[in-house]
């Protein structure tokens, strides 16, 4: 594995976002003590260099000795998510700086294998904070950007168009069943068509095998309870979505919400079985989501105000855990308390 550790300087992009719960200035947020080490996971179709600008901005607001790690994972993110999770775990388990706890930041698809590694208990060192930026936490149900329209335009004169675009019709018939095979690329695994959801007494659940596991939507057996337990060991789980995201489609997947079966409305995470099955309800105020209005998939992680107000305050130091007026029941970042999760208290 390429253990590239990146400490990079570049420009930044500014958009307007509201201040977080009246948090103070960056100087007030930054403490004399350095933050926990950070692992920053890159996006699909990219390597670690796609984080250069974001890490450069982040370094402006953390202690100068805070270590920020990143690494090329999963053949530009296309490898199966399980393989990427193991590759991430191998990096972590061979990095002694993480032994007293660390923070995970996952941009785009980078938030998926990192969360899977946490849930599956692959990490020898404790994750205190998990922050996702425009990550498809519930999957995607449209191809990114203009792929649909461009493809449809080329074959429009040969195949009659239906309400669902041609490429998506094909994907539902060809790509989706591939999830039954043991080895599929990540771009197929995260395909989660609403009409493939199943009705249950507690709500809609995915029939995508990958999300059945990742989001505890399948049988609530001992493996599912283990995943819930492991996720509940987090002191902070914070997800950031971009309202103009056309890569994670629907963009609400970045904040854990998802369409209903006929895609007529977006169902809030609190109304999904995942909310309880995965332990998000147990996390309480430790679990939070925010939407950055006007941000796009490719701009959100390089926006300085987003980094300053939606990332830095969640970096896992006890001195910074006064988010929401001090109402959160965060644990001290002490390895001795790891695995003493909320669901077991």
Image (cartoon, rainbow, N blue to C red):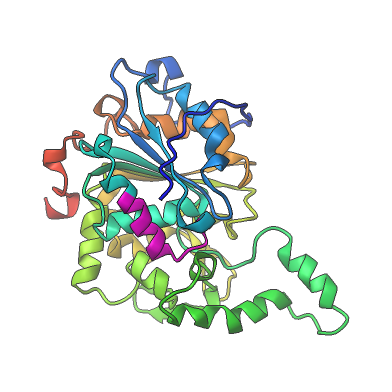
User: Residue 242 placed where, x, y %?
Assistant: 57, 46
Span highlighted in magenta in the image? 77-90
Magenta stretch, main secondary structure class: helix
Q: Quadrant of residue 296?
A: top right
In the displayed structure, 76 sits above or below 261; it is above
In the current view of this chain or complex, which residue is farthest to the front?
Answer: 1
Q: Is residue 268 left or right of residue 115?
A: right
The foreground one among 285 and 129 is 129
Q: Residue at 28%, 58% (x, y): give it.
A: 119
> Is residue 88 magenta-colored?
yes
* Residue 248 makes an appearance in the image: yes
Q: Is residue 211 left or right of residue 174?
A: left
- The residue located at (22%, 69%) in the rendering is 223
The quadrant in which residue 39 appears is: top left
| Point 38% across, 64% down: residue | 82
Which residue occupies 57% across, 50% down?
46
- Is residue 271 shown to the viewer in this render? no
Quick check: 319 left or right of 253? left
Residue 168 in the image, given as x and y percentages of width and height: 66, 75
């Amino acid at each position: 594995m390429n253990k590239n550790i990146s400490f990079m300087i570049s420009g930044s992009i500014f958009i307007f976002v509201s201040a977080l719960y009246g948090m103070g200035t960056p100087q007030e947020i930054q403490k004399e003590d350095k933050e926990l080490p950070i692992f920053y996971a890159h996006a699909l179709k990219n390597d670690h260099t796609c984080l250069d600008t974001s890490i450069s901005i982040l370094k402006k607001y953390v202690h100068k000795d805070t270590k920020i790690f990143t690494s090329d994972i999963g053949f530009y993110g296309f490898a199966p998510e399980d393989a990427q999770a193991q590759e991430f775990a191998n990096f972590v388990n061979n990095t002694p700086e993480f032994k007293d706890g660390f923070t995970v930041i996952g941009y785009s698809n980078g938030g998926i294998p990192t969360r899977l590694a946490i849930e599956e208990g692959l990490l020898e060192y404790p994750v205190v904070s998990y922050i996702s930026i425009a990550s498809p936490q519930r999957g995607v149900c449209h191809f990114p950007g203009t792929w649909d329209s461009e493809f449809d335009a080329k074959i429009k004169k040969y195949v009659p168009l239906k309400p669902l675009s041609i490429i998506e019709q094909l994907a539902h018939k060809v790509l989706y069943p591939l999830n039954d095979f043991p080895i599929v690329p990540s771009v197929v695994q995260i395909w989660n068509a609403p009409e493939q959801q199943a009705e249950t007494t507690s709500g809609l659940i995915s029939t995508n095998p990958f999300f059945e596991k990742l989001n505890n939507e399948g049988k609530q057996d001992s493996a599912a309870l283990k995943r819930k337990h492991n996720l509940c060991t987090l002191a902070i789980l914070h997800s950031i979505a971009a309202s103009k995201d056309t890569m994670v489609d629907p963009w609400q997947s970045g904040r854990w919400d998802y369409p209903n079966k006929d895609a007529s409305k977006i169902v809030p995470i609190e109304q999904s079985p995942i909310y309880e099955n995965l332990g998000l309800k147990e996390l309480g105020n430790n679990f939070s989501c925010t939407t950055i209005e006007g941000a796009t998939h490719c701009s959100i992680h390089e926006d300085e105000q987003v980094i300053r107000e939606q990332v830095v305050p969640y970096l896992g130091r006890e001195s910074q855990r006064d988010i929401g007026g001090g109402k959160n029941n965060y644990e001290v970042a002490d390895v001795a308390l790891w695995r003493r999760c909320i669901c077991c208290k």
